[in-house]
Amino acid sequence: MKIYLYPAYFRRVDSGGYSVDFPDLPGCVSAGDTLEKSLSMAREALSLHLYGMIEDGDTIPVSSDPAAIPTEPGAFVAPVEGRPEMVGDKIRNRSVKKTLTIPNWLNEAAEAQKVNFSQVLQEALRERIG
């Protein structure tokens, strides 16, 4: 699994939390009520942003040297890890609701046997698509 490391710019906000942005990745922003939450949310935002770029076929930029990023008073730069494959795994494995139609007699028979419709459909689909 490829791990990306990008500098994140943390700014303290009036509410006491932090806003976070990534100078190398315009539009990749996050925030949190505490430093710990801000860092966690920054990891998630970075991973999701990189996943989207990879899915879109965009070029992933080279990360900047954190020491070369100027900061304003009260702000700081810290490296943050991004793991886009983890986001992709979550997206691919999330459940989706499907509506289907079956004859009433089949529904009644299956319910009488306490059949798990979702499980049966998943097994049948796996067998069908290999």
Image (cartoon, rainbow, N blue to C red):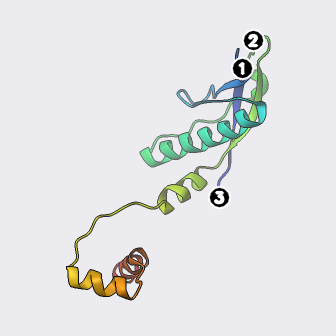
Q: Position of residue 24 (x, y in %)?
A: 61, 29
| Camera-side residue of 7 and 89 | 89
Residue 11's disc is: 1
Q: CA distance from mark 2 to mark 3?
A: 35 Å
For residue 114, what is the image quadrant?
bottom left
Residue ID for mark 3: 1
Label 1's element?
strand
Disc 3 element: loop
Q: Residue furthest left?
A: 103
Instruction: Give the CA distance from mark 2 to mark 1.
Output: 8 Å
Q: Of tags 1 and 3, which is closer to the observer?
A: 1
Query: Which part of the image, by quadrant, shows the N terminus?
Result: bottom right
Q: Residue at x 55, y 43 (%)?
A: 48
Marks 2 and 1 close (CB-CB < 8 Å): yes
Question: Mark 1 to mark 3: distance in Å?
Answer: 30 Å
Q: Which mark is residue 72?
A: 2
For badge 2, the amino acid type reads: Glu
| Three-letter amino acid code of the residue under disc 3 | Met
Q: Provide residue 57's location: percent of width, then percent of height.
A: 44, 45
Residue drawn at (63%, 36%), measured in percent from left and top?
62
**Residue 12 quadrant:** top right
For discs 2 and 3, the disc positioned in front in the rendered view: 2
